[in-house]
Amino acid sequence: MNHDSTMTTAIAPLAYPPERLAVGSSLSLTGILALVLVAGWLVTRWSRRRGLGGANNRLQVVERLGLGSRRELLLVRIDQQQFVLGVTEQRIETITSCMASEFGAIGAVTPCEGASR
């Protein structure tokens, strides 16, 4: 056995310097986080436009009509009762209410009982 030979291990140089890898990883993580946030925002916005949930929920926004800046009319159903609500920044006011079966078909002029004429 020859003790004169020394073991040398060559370390291959990195393809990219560590600083560049850190910046690239940070940008990738930031991009993924941004995509998750945008996807969450889109799902929230989509679900609000469709009402407060599916058919199994007791509370549903059936229809929404914008009346200008920060004012709208909502047709809301809670179980079998429907409410027409006037909504502003300061308050929510019940305009009329009736049973869903009394509301009539879309386009029919059948006011709910107690509605002002």
Image (cartoon, rainbow, N blue to C red):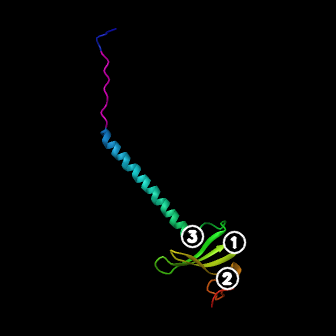
Sequence-first disc among 2 and 1: 1
Q: In front here: 37 or 11?
A: 37
Question: Could you say whether the residue bearing mark 3 is in a helix, strand or loop?
Answer: loop
**Residue corresponding to mark 1:** 79
Q: Residue at x 70, y 82 (%)?
A: 102
Q: Quadrant of the N terminus?
A: top left
Question: Could you say whether the residue bearing mark 1 is in a helix, strand or loop?
Answer: loop
Distance between the Cα atoms at labels 2 and 1?
A: 14 Å
Sequence-first disc among 2 and 3: 3
Distance between the Cα atoms at labels 1 and 3?
A: 17 Å
Q: Is residue 101 above or below residue 50?
A: below
Q: Residue furthest left?
A: 4
Distance between the Cα atoms at labels 2 and 3?
A: 20 Å
Q: In front here: 100 or 67?
A: 67
**Residue corresponding to mark 3:** 50
Which numbered circle lies on residue 103?
A: 2
Sequence-first disc among 1 and 3: 3
Looking at the picture, how far across and down is residue 12, in whole percent? Answer: 31, 31
Q: Which residues are magenta?
A: 6-14
Amino acid found under the numbered disc labelled 3: Arg
Q: Quadrant of the C terminus?
A: bottom right
Mark 1 closeness class: few <14, some 14–19, many ≥20 residues within 10 Å: few
Q: Residue at x 65, y 83 (%)?
A: 105
Q: Is residue 80 above or below residue 42?
A: below
Looking at the picture, how far across and down is residue 21, in whole percent? Answer: 34, 42
Q: In front here: 59 or 116?
A: 116
Dominant secondary-structure state across the stretch colored magenta: loop
